[in-house]
Image (cartoon, helix red, strand yellow):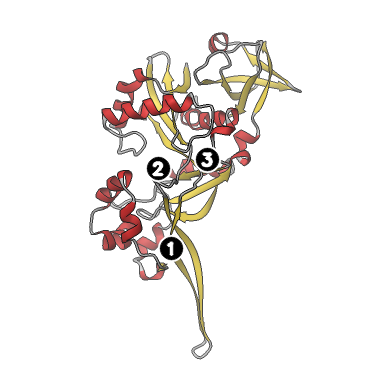
Amino acid sequence: MYIVRSARESDLDDLFELSKLENFLNLPNDRQRLKRNIEKSLNSFSSKNFNPNNTFLFCLEDLSENKVIGTSVIHAQHGTESKPHFALVVGEESKKSTSVDKSFVHTTLKLSIDTSGPTEIGGLVLAPKYRGSKSKLGKQVAFSRFLYMAHRPELFQEVIHAELLPPFNEDGSAPLWEAIGKKFFQMDYQQADILSRKNKEFILNLFPSENIYASLLSKQAQAAIGAVNSGTIPLMKMLKKIGFKYNNEIDPFDGGPHYRSLREEILPIKESIKAKASLVDNARNSFLMLSNNSEDFKCFVNTCNINKNLLEIEKSELVDKLIDLNNEVRVIPI
């Protein structure tokens, strides 16, 4: 059995083990930073009102192992006065000459800065041995964020933002960084990436402020603009399927695409249901179900039927533990 829940202080060791899988921005391989992230998440989940500094850390737990096996994150606002959101806007510029009978449409890149940004989703991590499970564990930990947004919309912005990883070179560098960033910052991609997590001032003051013409870049760098790496394709397809669209913005360092959707237009949120529930022996459809029997955030997948305004929930051990049939239950399809 599996549940997704808000992070706890006791999760530190498990999260530290997960952080060793890759160099995750939202799951740093640093015990002290992870401890601070958990503390910040605990404060965020207890919030009554919107706070741009809130960060919500969700943990997927394998109950049979008593172990956290995956995570996901919501940042209440990505792009503030103290930590602006930087992006390269992908545009077009037409050029035409009648005397030589030539016309061109150039792809352009221009730095943009946002200090009143959207809510951002990220930090999607799943331990390798659990990937490809019939239980759709990656989807569970990803969709738990939308269930929480449906439950507490006042804590989030109207626009939801996601940043996807681009193709990387074998040495871990990014083709777009080699073509642009390295020339203006005079440092390696990894150095700039780490520095940007603490201080973004250098981006504003060192990055070119005018249009950059993609045709001046290498073909490899041009191909990387807005592209995703092979491991990110399933996530991109999932986001597009539920309503996210590429918004012609890319990461200024690596060229990874930015996707966005209006919060209320995200399919799981749009199809969210809150209703009275009753127990049945058999049901047909899978839903991610929010516990209404705890002050902490907890959710799990269960089979349900929707019959008019009534949820018919199939009996299960988790339903017995986490659902109070005297109160309404919120579910989203999964």
The percent coordinates of residue 257 (x first, y second) are 45, 51
Amino acid type shown at disc 1: Lys
Seen at 56% across and 17% down, the residue is: 291
Seen at 58% across and 33% down, the residue is: 154
Residue wearing tag 2:
231
Amino acid type shown at disc 3: Met
The percent coordinates of residue 150 (x first, y second) are 60, 31
| Residue 74 tag number | none
Q: Quadrant of the C terminus?
A: top right
23 left or right of 92 in image: left
79 left or right of 35 in image: right
The percent coordinates of residue 229 (x first, y second) are 39, 48
Please report whichever mark, 1 or 3, sits nearer to the chain's N-terminal start: 1
Residue wearing tag 1:
110
The residues bearing labels 1 and 3 have C-alpha atoms spaced at a distance of 28 Å
Res. 326 image quadrant: top right
Amino acid type shown at disc 2: Gly
Where 104 sits versus 193, above or below? below
Residue wearing tag 3:
238
Q: Residue furthest right?
A: 308
Element on which disc 3 rests? helix
